[in-house]
Image (tube, helix red, strand yellow):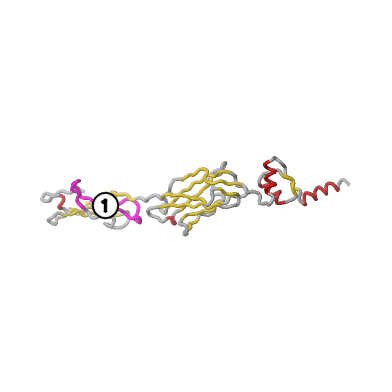
């Protein structure tokens, strides 16, 4: 700000500055003490809105007093300053496991930061994309804020029919002023695999698979394990044997 006076030098004046938000009266709380910058030959003040400041356009008004007590009165300027919201920032993510079998769970944890908001007030969006699929929240639980770990978390539990392979991950953060980050995308973030046979004779099943053999078994669980892991198998359980016997009896 610059002033002039027939009797006084500019630096001897007293300059008063006030601001006004879109709603409310004239204030000075966001302003520093007004000082004269001799290197720039002008009056200056810092305007520093707090994290709770109203966003939008601000008016300012200025009054100059000289050493004789004379005053210019207020000079008002509309929409001189605009206060905006600081966008939130996505910080990082972690996985409790970067490889998960179908029906098992890995926890995705996310951290964010913001100048105005505490992390727990953010809204976090997490999506996954299977190798041949599109972005989705399928198999993800509702996201919650874990105060003990100070992070946002969701459970990823691929279903029994979930596509196998590498999944991409993307994350977006929204704050309480509806500001948002861009998507943060991570390729091949987590691997979904099939469950190995949960049987004591897994070695037999695996041997048959590795050697291109067809497993013939009476054990129902072994047959189920073969089916779940795409292994060739003939199941001769009680039902199958009864069917064979019934067909043979028809020949008599």
Looking at this rendering, what residue extends furthest in the top direction?
212
| Residue 137 position in % (x across, y down) | 54, 49
Relative vertical location of residue 69 with respect to residue 212 in this rendering, above or below: below
The span picked out in magenta is 35-61
Is residue 157 left or right of 227 when viewed as pictured?
Answer: left
Q: Nearer the viewer, residue 247 or 97?
A: 97
To which residue does mark 1 refer? 46
Q: Position of residue 64 (x, y in %)?
A: 18, 53
From this viewpoint, which residue is outermost toward the bottom?
148
Q: Residue at x 49, y 50 (%)?
A: 94
Residue 125's spot in the image, x, y percent? 48, 50
Q: Relative to 176, is 132 on the left or the right?
A: right
Query: Residue 119 location, x and y as percent?
Result: 43, 55
Numbered-mark total: 1
User: Is 86 included in the stretch rendered in magenta?
Assistant: no
- Left or right of residue 220: residue 45: left
Image height of 116 relative to 215, above or below: below
Residue furthest toward the left? 7
Callout 1: helix, strand or loop? loop
In magenta segment, residue 40: yes
Mark 1, residues whose alpha carbon is within 10 Å: few (<14), some, or many (≥20)? Answer: few
The residue lying at 11 percent from left, 49 percent from top is 6
Which one is nearer the viewer's eye here, 220 or 84?
A: 220
The residue located at (48%, 44%) in the rendering is 185
* Side of 76 where 142 appears, left or right: right
């Amino acid at each position: 700000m610059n002033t002039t006076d027939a009797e006084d030098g500019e630096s001897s004046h007293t300059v008063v500055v006030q601001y006004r938000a879109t709603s409310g009266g004239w204030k000075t709380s966001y302003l520093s003490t007004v000082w004269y910058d001799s290197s720039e030959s002008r009056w200056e003040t810092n305007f520093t809105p707090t994290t709770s400041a109203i966003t939008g356009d601000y008016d300012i008004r200025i009054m100059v007093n000289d050493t004789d007590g004379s005053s210019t009165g207020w000079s008002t300027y509309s929409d001189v300053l605009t206060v905006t919201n600081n966008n939130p920032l996505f910080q990082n993510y972690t996985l409790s496991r970067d490889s998960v079998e179908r029906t098992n769970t890995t926890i995705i944890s996310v951290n964010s930061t913001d100048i105005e908001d505490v992390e727990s007030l953010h809204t976090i969006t997490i999506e996954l994309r299977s190798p041949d699929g599109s972005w989705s929240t399928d198999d993800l639980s509702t996201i919650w804020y874990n105060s003990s770990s100070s992070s946002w978390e969701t459970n990823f539990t691929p279903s029994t029919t979930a596509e196998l392979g590498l999944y991409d991950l993307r994350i977006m953060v929204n704050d309480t002023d509806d500001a948002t980050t861009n998507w943060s995308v991570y390729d091949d973030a987590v691997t979904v695999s099939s469950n190995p046979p949960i049987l004591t004779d897994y070695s037999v099943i695996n041997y048959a698979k590795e050697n291109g053999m067809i497993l013939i078994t009476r054990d129902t669980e072994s047959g189920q394990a073969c089916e779940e892991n795409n292994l060739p198998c003939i199941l001769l359980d009680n039902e199958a044997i009864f069917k064979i016997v019934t067909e043979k009896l028809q020949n008599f």
